[in-house]
Image (cartoon, rainbow, N blue to C red):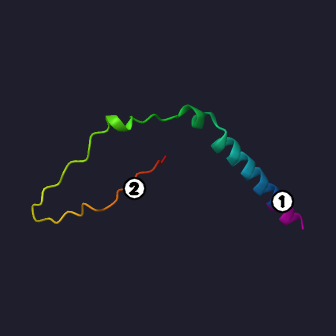
Amino acid sequence: MQKSYDTFVLCVVMIVLTAMSGCGGSASKESVKTYPALAEIPPIQEYSDDGRHWNTDAICWVSVAD
């Protein structure tokens, strides 16, 4: 019984420490990233039909990552 209680307390302490350091840390508040406006991004180049059979109907998905 004591071992399961100690394990539970350890898990709670680890969760609290992780939340305090990862979610509420000062590093996450200071690293706010800015991105250029959509109008400032140059258009995608046109690919010529040089026998490579480019897939121009493909969709490129861009998302935010750390």
Judged left or right of residue 35, residue 53 is left
Residue pointed to by mark 1: 6
Residue segment shown in magenta: 1-7
For residue 43, what is the image quadrant? top left
Q: Position of residue 28 (x, y in %)?
A: 58, 37
Residue pointed to by mark 2: 61
Residue count near mark 1 (Cα–Cα under 10 Å), binned few <14, some 14–19, many ≥20: few
Judged left or right of residue 35, residue 22 is right
Q: Is residue 59 above or below residue 13?
A: below
Question: Which type of secondary structure does the marked residue at label 2 adopt?
Answer: loop
Question: Residue at the spot x=31%, y=38% of the render?
Answer: 41
Query: Which secondary structure dominates the residues rendered in magenta?
Result: helix
Q: Residue furthest bottom?
A: 1
Tell me the kind of residue under disc 2.
Answer: Trp
Question: Residue at the spot x=52%, y=34% of the render?
Answer: 32
What is the distance, in whole Å, between disc 2 and disc 1 at their CAs? 46 Å
Of 22 and 50, which appears nearest the observer?
A: 50
Q: Position of residue 54 (x, y in %)?
A: 20, 63
